[in-house]
Amino acid sequence: MPIAIAVTSPDLVLPAPDGPAPTAAVFRPPDAQPLETAVAQAALLLDQCGHLVVVYPDALPADYVRRLHSVRSVLESDRVALLPVALPPLAVAVLARQLRQLSLSDLGPGVLASATRLLAHYIYAGAQLASVARFDRVPVGLGPHLTSLLPGVRFGVLVNPAPRLVRPGGGGDDVPGPAYPTRLTVARDGPRKGDDWVLDHLAPGWRVEGVQEISPLPADSARWWGTRRAVEFAAAIPDPSILYQLITSVRREECHWCGLELIGDRCGFCSAAAGAAA
């Protein structure tokens, strides 16, 4: 059975445009799912799949994060990995889809969980925004904040892998893109209206291999970007075989605490630092 992948909102479960990908389980917030139900759901996934990897935005409300840790504590299981990701919601959904695809491979649970940080680095995530007045994810000067008050103004923002803020159509709006093949996933707050910086400028400039449009925006996007008037995007490697090669090219070692194989500097299941003495 594939390793179970779970997310914290139904809109973080994206369709896979190419090839098979198991669906992701969805945990609900504390006010929508009793603790007993969440524990039973997690226990069933562990019985069916052996290990459970939960991916969620690092901006998830604190009470929801506590709920996830409560579920793991009640189960007293070291087979549950809770992985906060410093990406906007759509990019988290794209990352979860990559993990779903890779869960069908022969990667062990420790390697798959610890590969989350590696895969996140290769996702180019950002948005076209109508305002940056409430946006605090990248440095925004006084000028852009004041410009946000003007009608018809747009901003292009890249938050990962490196922050960048530009004014589409104003010159100097080129954003360095990935040097490897990607597919672009796009979500917007409504029907396309007029010029679209993401599809008309970024997509051809980055030479993406295809575009998948999602509607509506993920529920948490408005809070993450500070506005619902957004066109969110994430460009990522679509081929799971390339992702597999990327992961398997990294040196593996055994976690000194739980014994799982891992890559990188920390175990995704027990959070022990790689190479540290027991």
Image (cartoon, rainbow, N blue to C red):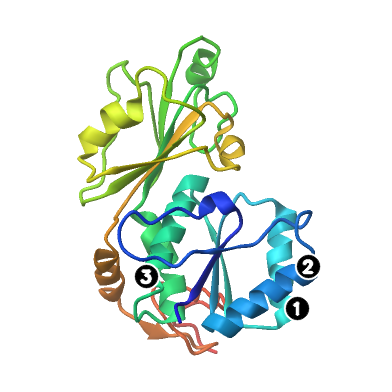
| Location of mark 1 (residue) | 74
Residue 46, image quadrant: bottom right
* Residue toward you, 258 or 191: 191
Mark 1 residue type: Val
| Location of mark 2 (residue) | 35
Task: State yes or no: discs 3 and 2 in contact (Cβ < 8 Å).
Answer: no
Which residue is rendered at x = 52% and y = 30% of the image?
A: 189
Q: Earlier in the sequence, mark 3 or mark 2?
A: 2
Is residue 88 in view from this perspective? no
The picture places residue 210, in percent across and down from the top left corner, at: 26, 44
| Location of mark 3 (residue) | 102
Q: Earlier in the sequence, mark 1 or mark 2?
A: 2
Asked if 130 appears above or below 205 in the picture, the reply is: above
The circle drawn on residue 169 is none
Which residue is rendered at x = 27% and y = 28% of the image?
A: 201
Asked if 278 appears above or below 97 in the picture, the reply is: below
Q: CA distance from mark 1 to mark 3?
A: 28 Å
Q: CA distance from mark 1 to mark 2?
A: 10 Å
Residue 245, image quadrant: bottom left
Image depth: mark 1 or mark 2 in front: 2
Callout 1: SS: helix
Is residue 247 in view from this perspective? yes
Task: State yes or no: discs 1 and 2 in contact (Cβ < 8 Å).
Answer: yes
